[in-house]
Image (spheres, helix red, strand yellow):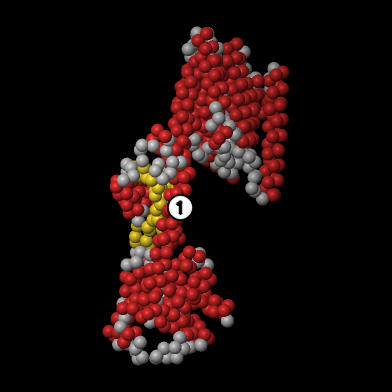
Amino acid sequence: MHSSISTDAPLHQGARPDHRAQADDARRAFVGVAAVGVAVHGVCALAGSTSTVVDDWLYCGLFYFAAASCAYRGRRGDAGVAWTVAAVGVVVWGTAEVVFRLSTPNRHTMYSHATLTLLFVAFTLAYATLGLLARERVRRFDPVLALDGVLTGLAAAAVGALLLFPAFGRGRVHPALPPQLLLVGALIGLMFVITVLGMTGWRPGPAWALIVTAIAVNVIGDVVLVQLADAGTFHRGSAADTLFVSSALLLGLAAFYPSRHATVPHDAARRLPAAILSAVAALGVLIAAAAHGARGLAAGLAAAALVVMIVRMSVALELLEHTRTQALADELTGLGNRRLLVSDLEHRLTPANERQPFMLALFDLDGFKRYNDTFGHPSGDALLVRLATRLAAAVAPGTAYRMGGDEFCAILEGAGPAAQAALIRAEKALTEHGDAFSITSSSGVVACPAEARTVPAALRTADARMYVAKAARALDQAQTRDAVLKMLYERDPALHEHMRAVAGLSVLVARRLGLDESTAQQIESAAELHDIGKIAVPDAILHKAGPLDANERRFMREYPIVGERILRAAPSLAPSAALVRSSHERWDGRGYPDGLRHDEAPIGARIIAVCDAYHAMRSAHPYRPARTMDQAVTELRRCAGTQFDPAVVQALCEELERQS
């Protein structure tokens, strides 16, 4: 019979030192007992002596000894199900030998039907164990590695079949006799194990090395058994039995090594030598089988190996083409990458294509970094995919590319109005607006080959023009902001100074709270404009010395919404709109205009609210004098947890203490 199993590296690895020492002692004890038992049985087998103690008691006892090791591993180690199945299989194997001895007193009689049935069950359990352990060993399926393993396993089995069944198919050895069936089963087991080794990139590890050894020993045992049966000299206690029990004990030794996933070096794993040598061996078997007129197991296995080799080459070529395609495509968006762009430009700028003008356009997204920082990278990736899809459709029949990050590129067909129209569509495709963000793009365009006849020149010119456009856009945004602030200053100088002071304090608090610099700058920008809506409030209400009546309070509660509308009307100021709208919300939900509570309001708005209140308390008003810093801080702490975010109040107080 045959049986084999395992996993990988000492069972006690990672255990506490005392457990490790115990495991080492147990493994050494197992090896000692197994070595002595096999040596005694082997000596008796070679000497031809007969001993009930050795041939029956010792022989069967060693099977149960191996099963005990597997059972212990099944209860205490990893891959418990596989090792439990292994233990049951070895117990059934040993029981088959016991039944054989009890039901067949004659030492020269072959296996009884009851024994063969039990051996078949043990055989089935052995293969179930192999499958379970292979699943533990190989977690990442690689089709080329899998086919390499199948190919090598089939080739090895074909060679074995040719050597072990030289007359198979010509009638001199009957393949249906039990010994031949056992040998065929052993060859299948060897093929399976070699397949698993191939899937790991031919890195077996100690446990799977024991598997290969166990099955190889089992195959040799079956060969000896076939020879004895064919010669009519079969008897219990032969060298075949020594080999069988050695196979079971190798399995028990493998139980001292834990499961560990195989790490496969992909470059080395896909090399051809193993596949080529296996195919050559299979071809040799076919030639030898044809020369001897054999058409049986060896020829069938060899033919299957050659078929697998053909499939393997087809899959490898398909993967190679897929890899080549991936090397030219952006992984996230599916657009062509920079490498493909350069290749396409080199082709289009050859002298043969000079009469086919085109425009090269580079695009850099404006506002994307802030979007990414605000909503997270997964949302940023989803937005890039959306924009890339729209860009590809907008520039058709031209081609869109992603250069990396938030930079895109497009080749626009022609150089006239059609190309200009495609450029306008592309810029529109790379535009996205929402309540809290605004994405646009800056572009640089070069006409080829009129303005650039080489790839470096085309890219350099387009890049320079893109950054000129980006700088102009930034200047325009700054000018828009300055214009709004100037208007506010002309309307109410004191309000303008108040907003600048709140902005300066807000950015310091944001940094103290650990917010990144981009977010801190955004909060500063919003704070500088947080009261912009007051330009719509009549002076009589804005500067009223006494308390406001209900209608006046209702009017004042509307100005954050007015401020939001003003900012959204200017794309460059739109990112600040949401913070301005929520800058008068309260921590307890009693603020306005939306009644947000706790962290429902953005952190930037909560920072602006605290800094606004502090500066308001420190400033003189017609209805009350300015408070001291200590008085203002005391009031902030009193209102923390009701009107204000306690963490923001604490950060502001720490910042004020640092400044004092």
Residue 489 horizontal/vertical position (percent) = 39, 79
Which residue appears at 32% of the width and 54% of the height? Answer: 428
Residue 424 seen: yes
Nearest the camera: 188 or 439?
Answer: 439
Q: Tell me: residue 250, above or below residue 173.
A: below
Which residue appears at 40% of the width and 82% of the height? Answer: 493
Residue 545 horizontal/vertical position (percent) = 36, 91
Which residue appears at 44% of the width and 88% of the height? Answer: 620
Q: Tell me: residue 619, above or below residue 63.
A: below
Q: Is residue 441 left or right of residue 16?
A: left
Q: Is residue 447 left or right of residue 41?
A: left
Nearest the camera: 206 or 83?
Answer: 206
**Which residue in the protein does label 1 denote?**
464
Residue 219 horizontal/vertical position (percent) = 59, 22
Which residue appears at 47% of the width and 33% of the height? Answer: 320
Nearest the camera: 657 or 76?
Answer: 657
Marker count (numbered): 1
On the image, which quarter does residue 239 sit in? top right
On the image, which quarter does residue 357 sit in? top left
Q: Residue furthest front?
A: 450
